Amino acid sequence: MNKHLQFLLKTLFFFVIFVMLLYFFSYLGRGQGSFIYNEF
């Protein structure tokens, strides 16, 4: 049971970091006005 809990906590921790990075980069890119895909 302890290994399952440790795996769940690690997964939740990395998921929170991933969501924070995604929000941070979307917040930085909000003032640019265009995505990279729109330049093609």
Image: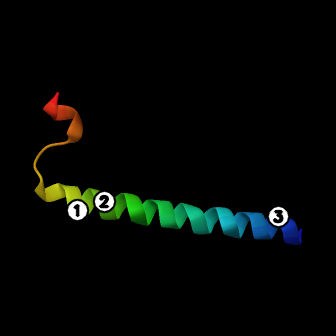
Q: Which residue is denoted by mark 1 in the rendering?
A: 28
What colour scheme has been applied to the protein in the rendered image? rainbow
Badge 3 element: helix
Q: Amino acid at mark 3?
A: His
Toward the right, the furthest residue is 1
Structural distance between the alpha carbons of marks 3 and 2? 32 Å
Mark 2 surroundings: few (<14), some (14-19) or many (≥20) residues within 10 A:
few
Residue at 50 percent of width and 66 percent of height? 17
Q: Residue furthest front?
A: 40
| Mark 2 → mark 1, Cα distance in angstroms | 5 Å
Q: Position of residue 31 (x, y in %)?
A: 12, 58
- Residue at (77% x, 70% y) in the render: 6
Image point (82%, 64%), residue name: 4
- Give the camera-side residue of 15 and 34: 34
What kind of residue is marked 1? Leu
Q: Which of the image's four quarters has the C terminus?
A: top left
Q: Are marks 2 and 1 in contact (CB under 8 Å)?
A: yes
